[in-house]
Amino acid sequence: MVSEQNGFILREPGAKSREVIKRDVNALSPSYTRSYGFTIDHGKGSELWDVDGSRYIDFAAGIAVLSTGHSHPRVVEAIIEQAQQYLHIGGTDFFCPKPVELAEQLQRLVPIHNTAPSDKLVYFANSGTESVEAALKLARYQEGRSHIIAFYGGFHGRTMGSLSLTASKSKQREGYPYIPGGVTHIPYPARNQCEEGAGGWCDAVGYIEKFVLKKVPPSEIAAIIVEPIQGEGGYLVPQDDFFSSLRAFCDKHGILIIADEIQSGVGRSGKFCAMEHWDVAADIVCLAKGLGSGMPIGAIVASKEVMGHWTPGTHASTFGGNPVSCAAALATIGVIEDEGLLDHVTELGDYTMKRLHAFMKDHPALHRVDGKGFMIGLDFYGSNGEPSPAIRDAIVNQCYLDGLITLGCGSYGIRFAPPLVLTKELLDEGLSILEHAIAQVEEDMW
Ligand SMILES: Cc1ncc(COP(=O)(O)O)c(C=O)c1O
């Protein structure tokens, strides 16, 4: 039995969920985009319970954030220990050991083009969009270079600077007339669209050379910002030669590559940074989401040569590098390494791809399955051969009714983005729910 309230379909019994949703609608901004009525009570590992006591498997990880799952004991312990010592000091004006410790870990883990670990520097922010703002300011701090190239479908955040780079959905920019300029968007060479011959421009460097350089000389281009695997845009993997050709072009013209690893980084793809899959390193790397296992933190990493342009006062933040968030991030890195999560994600990600590809053969509504590790996108089409947001929405809803938390991406995709600690047992249980939901919606709507 289900019922509807405020546009959400609710599982029964949903009295407590309904009550929270009713108050939420009267108290919180209408700009949030909830598509169903899941109302959290608590989580543990890769499982969740709603306020009415129903259990769910989590394939969304709080929008690809909960890398170590819900309330990993080691992360919780690190948070408590730091909170008892001190909560805040203001890393812009005082020295503090925790951000130093975390910066040293990121020097070791985040590859930067032609840079040894000890020649890297780290700046801390509080979120993804702030990391992107920092990267944007750093790239533009170079003398005479201010233009930025970004990709259609890319999502880099919602504050004004990062919004100028975002071209994922027009809704995100609609109604804001003063978004900063100096940005040219170009087509993202998603390998599935290129293989299907439907993607238009698959040679990104060719596009820049043919079109962008007619408008802006390369000497004025500060950076090209790219998600190694597009996230909000639809979990799209680029063509294999994309990063090597981009690197060669940027090296030739002295242009920086900013890798927005906010969604794809911290192990989600099976590597610490997703760009490692292509053996190419960026000049500035943005991290956030999974870094703090749910505590707000963002970071950018760059070479001393690049970040060394900044002088005291050129950029800072009161809360950036908060010691509690840094403690959570240090524990997150410890869990990822000690529990062998990169190998785990690679192995179970391959298994998931195989299982969904096999399922796809008999289920034409599932049009595409692609990704890396625990960053896999599923696209849904209708019987008319066109992408179908309606079928996708119905499957997301059906999963919720059957006890699986999923999230859409792009216009007609579902993202598989579970906690990195997801067990094989829960993965199998969750995939069965997903497959059942697809089959059921296909029966009704195909
Ligand atoms: C690739 C990417 N960059 C930036 C952001 C913005 O992060 P935040 O929502 O923490 O500001 C997101 C968020 O979804 C993202 O996926």
Image (cartoon, rainbow, N blue to C red):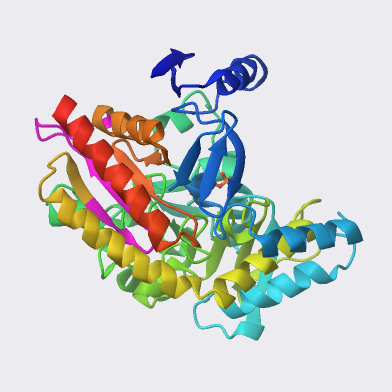
Camera-side residue of 298 and 418? 418
Whether residue 314 can be seen here: no
Q: Quadrant of residue 142?
A: bottom right
Write the residue at 60% across / 60% down: 291
Confirm whether the magenta stretch covers residue 380.
Answer: yes
Image x and y of residue 332, in percent: 63, 65
Q: Quadrant of residue 195?
A: bottom left
Write the residue at 69% across / 77% down: 104
Is the C terminus in the top left, top right, bottom left or bottom right quadrant?
A: top left
User: Taking 117 as reference, is 378 left or right?
Assistant: left
306 shown above or below 231: below
Write the residue at 50% across / 45% down: 63
Camera-side residue of 200 and 361? 361
Whether residue 22 can be seen here: yes
Q: Which residues are magenta?
A: 369-389
Write the residue at 56% across / 18% down: 15
Image x and y of residue 302, in percent: 60, 71
Image x and y of residue 212, in percent: 33, 53
Image x and y of residue 295, in percent: 68, 52
User: Taking 13 as reference, is 347 left or right?
Assistant: left
Camera-side residue of 201 and 381? 381
Confirm whether the magenta stretch covers residue 217.
Answer: no
Camera-side residue of 210 and 414? 414
Count of residue discs: 0
Is the N terminus in the top left, top right, bottom left or bottom right quadrant?
A: top left
User: Taking 220 as reference, is 159 left or right?
Assistant: right
